[in-house]
Image (cartoon, rainbow, N blue to C red):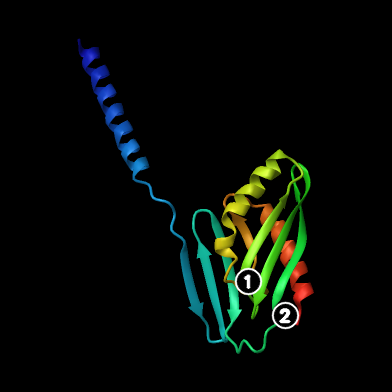
Amino acid sequence: MNNKKVIVSVVAVVAVAAAAIGIAASNKKAPTPVTSVTSTGSGQTTTTTSDTTATSTTTTPVADKNNVAYKDGTYTATGSYQSPGGPDKVGVTVTLKNDIITSASVTPMPGDRESAHYQSLFASGYQAVVVGKDISTLHLDAVSGSSLTPIGFNDAIAQIKAQAKA
């Protein structure tokens, strides 16, 4: 008889815990990007944008935009990186106006199925941390769970910087 009470009590506790977890999971909201802007006395502004899927940090000189480092236009390059499955590439096209990326697109060029998955994840989330940013300081670390595709993206951006140098 005593064992029945213990078993019933344990089952009740487990049921209450499972219900609480279910309620908490159903109330979970999509991540909201957080952007912080810090101005320094050195004439620069540092902007960090992050959420649970991506982080991007740019340091933008606060200066007269008549003194741009890159020519306005649309530029394309193919970035390379090494994944566990072998070499991979990603095509990148950006449009620049006064050193700011006004539009961007990527063309996945995976070497295998796993790379295709991660390049797809990257493609679904990179624009939020690229468009509107100064190309001179743009550097991506991880986007939407993809940590290697940004290496190829950064490689392509370096090539684009060389093409667009004013």
| Residue 102 percent across, percent down from the top left | 61, 71
Label 1 neighbour load within 10 Å: few <14, some 14-19, many 20+: many
Q: Please determine whether, in this image, residue 113 is positioned above or below residue 162.
A: above
Task: Report the front residue among 45 and 93.
Answer: 93
The picture quadrant where one finds residue 98 is: bottom right
Q: Residue furthest front?
A: 74
- SS type, badge 1: strand
- For image coordinates 49% across by 74% down, the residue present is 37
Amino acid marked by disc 2: Lys
Amino acid marked by disc 1: Ile
Judging by the rendered image, the residue that carries numbered circle 2 is 71
- For image coordinates 63% across by 48% down, the residue present is 120
- For image coordinates 21% across by 17% down, the residue present is 5
Label 2 neighbour load within 10 Å: few <14, some 14-19, many 20+: some
Judging by the rendered image, the residue that carries numbered circle 1 is 101
The picture quadrant where one finds residue 135 is: bottom right
Measured in 3D between alpha carbons, the distance from the residue under mark 2 to the one under mark 1, in whole angstroms, is 12 Å
Task: Report the front residue among 27 and 95.
Answer: 95
| Residue 160 percent across, percent down from the top left | 75, 69
Looking at the rendered image, the quarter that the C terminus falls into is bottom right
Looking at the rendered image, the quarter that the N terminus falls into is top left
Horizontal side of 138 relative to 18 (left or right) equals right
Q: Please determine whether, in this image, residue 116 is positioned above or below residue 63.
A: above
